[in-house]
Amino acid sequence: MATRFSVIIPAYNSASTLARAIDSVLGQNHPAQEIIVVDDGSSDETPAVAARYGAKVRYIRQDNAGVSAARNRGAHAASGDWLAFLDADDWYYPDRLKLHAEWIQEDSTLDFLTGDYEYQDDAGNLLGTSMAQHAAGRTMLAKARGRLRVVMDQPHEIQAYVADHFGDTHTLSVPRALFIELGGYPLGYRVCEDVHFLTRLVSRSRRIGVICAPLGVYLIHQDSATRRNPVAAQQENVRTLTALERLARNFPSPVRLGIKQRIQDARYNLACALTRNGQRSAAIRAVLPSLVSNPGWRSLRDVLSLLKG
């Protein structure tokens, strides 16, 4: 039986970009079984944009509850065996579903799949690709040796992927049953909720399929909330990862080590944001926990670099 994908698009005041996202799913060379737009309480013309597609799009509206709640709502409503996600301001390339669907048909041992994607700005300029910009991605590209497909299955690969993953939500393909079993995306977090879910997914996985070609585009907004208030964004990042670390006591060792590395990086990034904001004492306090939880030269170096400014 052909792989049946439900594509879930959370949307909040997305009238200006939603049509491009939907069109990119409708243009897939492996058709999605369904497209589910979950409107997270929009006050603009998002409902009207979705309505233009008629029966081609399943539209669900909910009171504003955040992107995690919207994705989870779509997953529970989905009828496909596999889930794919797409934010309303991003878009797929035509083979995004096909490349995963064909591999799923050929190899039933894959726990989930991911892949490369492009970063573009609002003007359409290419800013880079995900796999090339992350050490874990470069490791998999080297392993692939020019092949389109490569399997991530070694402990050091898993650790690096958890520490600083390539790919993102819109390149993730996950069995619906596993998504539901894991509880979906966590509620109550505004930043890094995707990492929280992805890490829990990795902890249950042994073989991860990676497509070494861009499957879509992630749009970089220069006026995003993360760039407007980097301190608040990094504080929320640390909060989410700290909660994840508490859940990770029974995770496989490579996953636990990857989380430790990721939270150490997050604390340092928070400290840098605080330093740029003139909050030197707060910056030192932000990285001190790493000396306790992850003692060593790296943690000491982080503290010394902040002391030196």
Image: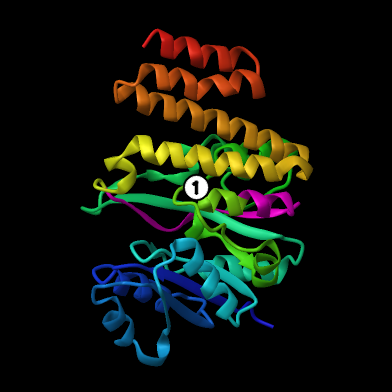
> Which quadrant is home to the C terminus?
top left
Q: Residue at x 33, y 81 (%)?
A: 50
Is residue 57 at all visible to an observer of this figure? yes
Relative to 170, say whether 189 is above or below: above
Q: Position of residue 155 (x, y in %)?
A: 74, 38
Q: Position of residue 283 (x, y in %)?
A: 42, 21
Q: Residue furthest left?
A: 123
Which residue bears the numbered disc 1? 192
Q: In the image shown, does 111 or 231 lie closer to the viewer?
A: 231
Q: In the image shown, does 127 or 281 lie closer to the viewer?
A: 281
Secondary structure category for the residue under label 1: loop
From the viewer's perspective, tell me whether residue 250 is left or right of residue 96.
Answer: right
Q: Residue furthest bottom?
A: 55
Amino acid type, callout 1: Cys
Q: Is residue 210 magenta?
A: yes
Q: Quadrant of residue 135?
A: top right
Q: Position of residue 35 (x, y in %)?
A: 46, 79
Q: Position of residue 214 (x, y in %)?
A: 45, 55
Q: Residue at x 44, y 37 (%)?
A: 235
Q: In the image shown, does 69 or 158 lie closer to the viewer?
A: 69
Q: Which residues are magenta?
A: 199-221
Is residue 294 at all visible to an observer of this figure? no
Q: Residue at x 56, y 12 (%)?
A: 300
Q: Is residue 255 magenta?
A: no
Relative to 104, say whether 221 is above or below: above
Relative to 9, say whether 66 is above or below: above
> Which quadrant is home to the N terminus?
bottom right
Q: Quadrant of residue 127?
A: top left
